[in-house]
Structures are given as C-alpha cells and as structure tokens.
C-alpha cells in the first residue's frame, strides 16, 4: 500500500507541485498563498469543481473589496479636505463680520 501511495505522489502530485513551486519562485509574489490558489485554479485540468469555482469567486471578491477600500480612502480624503476648507472659511467669517460693525 505504501508503494501505491509513493507511485501516486510521483506520477500525479509531484509534477503539479514542481510546476507550482517553479512559478512561485519565478514570480516571487508578495502574497504567495493567493498566488498559488490562482495558479492551481488556472491550471486545473478543465475540472470545474464547486471548490474551484468558489476559489475563483473569492479572488474576484477580494479584488472588488480592495478596489472599494481604495475608493473609500479617496472619498475620505476629499471629505476631510472639504471639511478643512469649510472650517477655515467659517473661522474667517466671524472675524470679518466683527470688523465691519
């Protein structure tokens, strides 16, 4: 039985793992686990299992979340800028109104 396991690993698993490791070493991604998941999904031999579909959807959702977080940061910066400008304008008005009386 151990021989069967060894043969399975050598013929089925090792070629995939070797290609995956080679690609990780060539690309050197900052986040290797998501990279490996994407690689495995992309290189799954045409099998579209529910697990692979979920992994693909999860990656798309992560990208969408990242884009939305960037948009929120940009909008927050704009809001802070407008609040600062409004606060500066409001601070100047009482002084000008008092000088004219």
Image (spheres, rainbow, N blue to C red):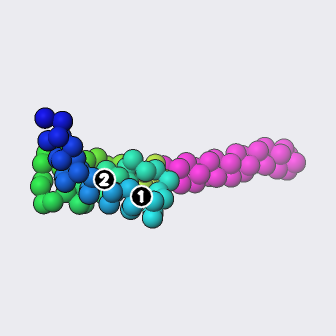
> Is 13 contained in the magenta span?
no
What range of the chain is rendered magenta?
Answer: 72-101
State the residue at coordinates (42%, 58%). 24
Residue 6 vs residue 89, the one in the foreground: 6
Q: Residues within 10 Å of mark 1 (few under 14, many from 20)?
A: some
Percent x, y for residue 5?
18, 40
Q: Give the Cα separation between the discs numbered 2 and 1.
A: 10 Å
Q: Which residue is mark 2?
A: 17
Q: Earlier in the sequence, mark 2 or mark 1?
A: 2
Q: Secondary structure at mark 2?
A: helix
Image height of 38 relative to 51, above or below: below
Residue 23 vs residue 81, the one in the foreground: 23
Q: Secondary structure at mark 1?
A: helix
Name the disc covering residue 24, or none.
1
Percent x, y for residue 39?
31, 57
Residue 6 seen in the current view: yes
State the residue at coordinates (13%, 60%). 46
Magenta stretch: dominant secondary structure: helix
Residue 3, quarter of the rendered image? top left
């Amino acid at each position: 039985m151990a021989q069967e396991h060894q043969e399975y690993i050598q013929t089925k698993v090792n070629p995939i793992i070797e290609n995956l490791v080679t690609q990780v070493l060539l690309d050197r991604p900052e986040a290797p686990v998501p990279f490996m998941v994407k690689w495995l999904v992309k290189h799954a031999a045409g099998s579209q299992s529910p697990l692979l579909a979920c992994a693909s959807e999860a990656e798309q959702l992560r990208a969408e979340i990242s884009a939305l977080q960037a948009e929120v940061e940009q909008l927050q910066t704009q809001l802070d800028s407008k609040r600062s400008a409004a606060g500066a304008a409001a601070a100047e008005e009482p002084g000008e109104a008092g000088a004219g009386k």
